[in-house]
Image (cartoon, rainbow, N blue to C red):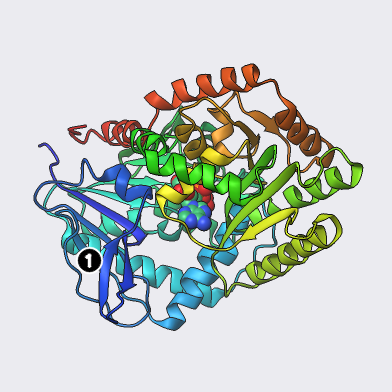
Amino acid sequence: MPHSALVVVANRLPIDEAVLESGAREWRRSPGGLVSALRPILQGDGTSWIGWAGSTGPAPDLPDIDGVALRAVPQSQEEFENYYEGFANSTIWPLYHDAVEQPTFHRRWWEAYQRINRRFAAAAAEAAPPGALVWVQDYHLQLVPAMLRELRPDLRIGFFMHIPFPPPELFKQIPRRADLLRGLLGADLVGFQVPGGARNFVRLIERVLGLRTRHNEIEVDGRVVHVGAFPISVDVGELEELARSEEVRAQAAQIRADLGNPDRILLGVDRLDYTKGIEHRLKAYRELLADGRVKVPNTVLVQVAVPSRERVEHYKALREKVEREVGGINGEYGRLGVPAVHYLNCSYNRAELAALYLAADVMVVTPLRDGMNLVAKEYVACRHDNGGALVLSEFAGAAHELKQAYLVNPHDLDDLKDSLVGALEADPSDTARRMRAMRRYLRTHDVTAWARAYLSALEFPVGL
Ligand code: ADQ
């Protein structure tokens, strides 16, 4: 039987509540991300999206968005603290990112994680028409596939992990490791960003659960679970069109002028997260200034760091450290009216981001570990002029694909400094050759190609 309905299950619904000038509130579709990826296929009867609306307390009634029914899953403040800030973002997130910060574990966090996962599974079971495909997203909801299969064995279930999946030596530290693996095995297809994540998962299934595996197939309860790598991407066409627009090009020129028309602009755009390597980047830049290899005002660094998970301890500490470092660099190397680092915490719309990308000579993407990193791909997608150079960490999933970037080990300060200088001083014909090759690759590996590859592997009839 063809599966015609699609139900997406993700921690967050693809909407934000906006407060209008009149004081009235309105729900708006969140820009970018998964929702744009899935828009072309989120059509047809029975299509829905299940997730949290963003505030604790009872679930709000929500309007349909682009014909997709939105169903909010509620959570209390205490559940938010234990499930989201606790188990998801203080146990799983650091552990899956090479434990670059110390993961912590509390039994009450795990209990809340189970409870919320069960609530999501129940909501999906209620929303899904017979034989539908339910696509569960990310590390917040690893128990949902098995819980949902128990409630609705008629469904086809997919799971996609947006963040890295760690090697067995690390994963095995989690006190409830077998439960997590069994949760994921409820899916028909478990997708990861890169082949290494898929390999780690299969090895763990053998070692922790002792199940038989063959290549990327796992036999469990008389079913076969498929495992694979599906690198996510961006809407290349949309970004390129935006970046080509008169308005964005003018905005890019204005940004350069506002910065005092320096010879070279370095740019970092990240969520303020300890996995993104912001501190390492600042340290490298500071040493380059100290060595005299980079000089203000010829060169400036713009670092956009949008705060996230602000109540979690590691994030508070990071924000303070980054602010202190930026203050130190500007105190030492800035001039009146010309800071060495322009540090911005605001959130930008797509056009503003595209203008920043167009204005930047060197994009610095140096995470210590990252599932994919969409910023790197967005930068390439926007550079229709084949201008600009991308400095990219080997530890970002994107490095497996964007091989012509200036690849760097962000843990090695000298390598980071040399790569930054290499990119700053590169011959324009070399940077253009690299950019052209990366753009050629991305054009055929955009976000629609990602969704199509994943859903075809699940035998979902994709009209893409
Ligand atoms: P994130 O860790 O959030 O995603 P990333 O892939 O870089 O990291 O995506 C960030 C997104 O936020 C980008 O689309 C970027 O444009 C946007 N953004 C950043 N700063 C912004 C700002 N100031 N204003 C507006 N928008 C901003 C997780 C994983 C990644 C994986 C993605 C998708 O950690 O590894 O690539 O999911 O699977």
The residue lying at 56 percent from left, 40 percent from top is 359
How many numbered marks does the figure carry?
1
Closest to the observer, 173 or 42: 42
Q: In the shown orientation, is residue 33 left or right of residue 253?
A: left
Q: In the shown orientation, is residue 133 left or right of residue 202?
A: left
Q: Report crowding for label 1: few under 14, some 14 to 19, many 20 or more residues within 10 A (C-alpha).
A: many
Q: Amino acid at mark 1?
A: Arg
Snapshot quadrant of residue 50: bottom left
Closest to the observer, 358 or 44: 358
Could one spot residue 234 in this view of the protein? Answer: no
The residue lying at 51 percent from left, 64 percent from top is 88
Q: Secondary structure at mark 1?
A: strand
Snapshot quadrant of residue 24: bottom left
Q: Position of residue 1 (x, y in %)?
A: 10, 37
Image vertical order of residue 219 relative to residue 145, above or below: above
Could one spot residue 322 in this view of the protein? Answer: yes
The residue lying at 59 percent from left, 44 percent from top is 256
Closest to the observer, 176 or 158: 158
Q: Position of residue 371 (x, y in %)?
A: 53, 44
Q: Which residue carries the number 1 mark?
A: 71
